[in-house]
Image: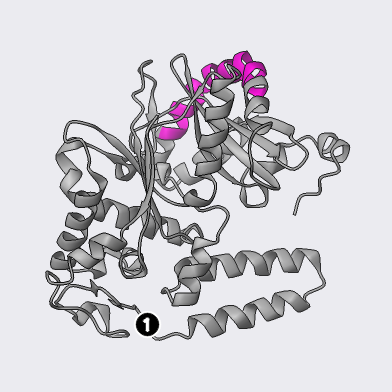
Amino acid sequence: MEVIMGAYWDSLDEIKNELKTASQSLLPVRKFDGVMFAPDKYMRTDGLPVDRSIADLEDVISKQTDPNEKKNLDALLQRMESVSDLTENLYARFNQNPNTFSNWFPQLAQAHKLAEQNGNTFFKIPETKCFTLPMELSQFMRIEYQDTNDVSKNAFNKILLKNLDLDKNKHYFLKNGEFSAKFQFRNCHLIPSEQKQVGEYFQVINNHAMSVGAGRTNDIVVREYIDEPENRPTIYDGMPLRTEFRCFIDCDTKDLIQTVPYWNPLVMKNVLQSQGLVDDRIYEWYETYKAFEPVLNQDFNDNVGRINNNVQSIIDVLSLKGCWSLDVMKSGNDFYLIDMAKMESSALTELINPKRLQQLNIKLQ
């Protein structure tokens, strides 16, 4: 397993002489023809007072006494942060976000290494490279793809290509630090012939993530693409229907709370069927999922016991704090640890048995 954590600060120093034209803050994006970033300069999309708006909303949240309203306001704050232009404060805030990849992956990789050394796990982790972009590039990646010009896209592509050191013959899986975008699978599956556009793919992925509240990160992640050996059907523009397990864990008490099917039948059929009423392509995905549902259910039931045993070995040596979701993907006979998030930010908590939560004295937020 290759695990590389890094940053692009050196690369920005190297291109100081190359990027002669840079934006001035607050210039309208559509009217700018030069490169939209350079060391210490970046393009913003508006002149809104981001820091003040966030502080005002946090003040409202701190005074809110109704739990449900407080939860709604917290969600609003996350959405506001997710779509806002970066400031120095917001950039630093994103780097402290526990859900961003660079804040949990090193601990997971270390726990996996320890469990593997002790012979206590059969899990694998895909080869992974994670980089935290400097503010100039992170802000550029937040601008709507259609609002950025070709000279800027090309410069961004070149910087990422130089630093990522991709194998020209390999496929890769791309994500930002908080969101995999696998619901638009064609964008996150980078094929060899399109590696020169890697920056553009990251920008599209990040734009999508921002629109669903998952843009609170400065990380970009390139992972080994795991081939699908069983020729399973696909949905979401090419995503194989592999069995996945969402394990809810408590890192403080070292408890495995419960494991639930990631592709939950009730959730999947409800969402795909309702959206399929207005989109024929999505309805085809609904039919595909419905036909393959028995295989996914059988796969889950056949493997959940040993998944739980092996996840417990990871939890025992995992140095994170609090409650998290940990996702496991089955590919053929292999099982991969692929994602984590704080439990309060995770979907599918409604599937946890209330008696189990009561037993462990856990209250969902």
Residue visible at 37% across and 51% down in the picture: 6
Write the start and end of the magenta stretch as one range: 285-308
- For mark 1, give the secondary structure: loop
Q: Nearer the viewer, residue 91 or 300?
A: 91
| Residue 42 appearing in the image | no
Q: Quadrant of residue 326?
A: top right
Where residue 330 appears, as percent x and y from the top left, is 49, 22
**Rendering quarter of residue 298:** top right
Amino acid type indicated by mark 1: Asp
Toward the viewer: 284 or 48?
A: 48
From the top left corner, tell me how far across and down residue 60 is, in percent.
70, 79
- Which image quarter is the C terminus in? bottom right
Position of the N terminus, as image quadrant, is top left
Q: Quadrant of residue 20?
A: bottom left
What color scheme is it? one colour
Q: Is residue 141 left or right of residue 19?
A: right
Residue 49 coordinates in the image, percent (x, y): 48, 86
Q: Residues within 10 Å of mark 1 (few under 14, many from 20)?
A: some
Query: Which residue is disc 1 drawn over?
Result: 46
Q: Residue at x 26, y 33 (%)?
A: 171
- The percent coordinates of residue 92 (x first, y second) are 49, 69
